[in-house]
Amino acid sequence: MEFKNELINWYSVKKRELPWRGTNNPYYIWLSEIILQQTQIKQGLPYYEEFVTQYPTIFDLSNASETSILKLWQGLGYYSRARNLHAAAKYIVNELKGEFPNNYKDLLKLKGVGDYTASAIASIAFNEIAAVVDGNVYRVLSRYFGIKTAINSTSGIKEFKDLATSLIDKEQPATYNQAIMEFGALQCKPKNPDCKTCPLKDSCVALEKDLIGELPLKLKKTKVTTKYFNFMVCIDSHKQTLIEKRTHKGIWHNLYQFPLIESDKSLTSEEFHLLNTKNTFLETIEFDYSLYNEIDIVHKLSHQHLHTKFWIIETNSAPEGAISIDSLTEYPVPALINDFIIRFKF
């Protein structure tokens, strides 16, 4: 039986019932695809359901504030996805009069939409013959055909896209695309795939040549950098604290955090005391301080490891701009800050 037919037959039996699979509404499909970038379904599903509830149409999403969208996204990571989602919604509403782009080429014009996402939406919502290539597809194709080209190389990206395009079922592109992605997620898993029950086992090159654990190949990752963060958690006698918005480009753009000092190493209490506190709120107040965590909390991002200390700053009166501690939960914050707020309990 042909490769594509095997996958579609497997999918008809094994596919998971997911809310975005019961519709061809491009808004819901787009929403699911953006949420599931870099995110497993079990983590992304509650976020999808909450977004659909709060923003049932593209107009609702466009009219929402960025702060409320980031707050809803909190904990999902890669926050640029949420900002791009909002920007694309505004573009569709304001420039396209609310009409969702209905083809691969026009979908690529949306902020945050690349080849994979445009192919997924075009095929699933509009039945366009546009082959998807995501992590699951790379894994299935590299193993089945025994391809040793690095999937994150320029030549590899082109090779796998061309191969995927040649294999897609032209009669039912939506079903085929979902089938191969689901197959990679459930059957041809990254680790310990169940090759004994695989419908493709008799013709899989990686299985035949004992390459399952080696494929797909990937070029070396970008070097991970280490940073040292010192968050200053102000608490005054009026139950107020200070937060700031991260307006510069980089991680956590437009999220909120406690005032931050970066250092070139993990600081002791004595070293923190000796810090030059000019240009921070500390130069304007009298305060006592204590260290919340003696051991650094290490927060791992894709290209950065943040070694973090939280310094508790106690003062009689916080500087101008302080907010009520009770209102902290209204602001979108990174997971690192949110975890601290939950643990510290103020």
Image (cartoon, grey):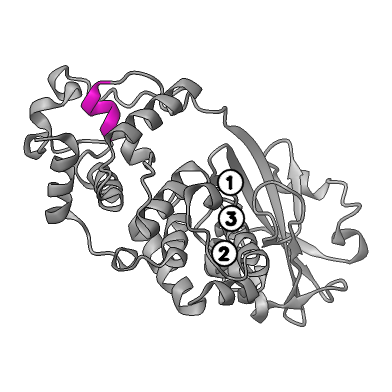
The magenta-colored residue range is 140-146
Which residue type does callout 3 highlight? Answer: Tyr
Q: Which of marks 1 and 3 is nearer the N terminus?
A: 3
Look at the numbered disc 2 and give the secondary structure of its residue. helix
Judging depth in this view, the residue of 309 and 222 nearest the camera is 222
Q: In which quarter of the image is residue 227?
A: top right
Height in image: 90 above or below 218? below
Q: At 12% across and 48% down in the image, what residue appears?
A: 9
Image coordinates of residue 337 in percent, x first then y, are 60, 60
Residue bearing mark 2? 338
Residue bearing mark 1? 296
Q: Earlier in the sequence, mark 1 or mark 2?
A: 1
Q: Using a 10 Å C-alpha cutoff, classify the residue at mark 3 as few (fewer than 14 neighbours), some (14 to 19) or many (20 or more).
A: many
Image coordinates of residue 319 in percent, x first then y, are 87, 71
Q: Residue 79 carries which label?
A: 3
Q: At 36% across and 23% down in the image, what residue appears?
A: 217
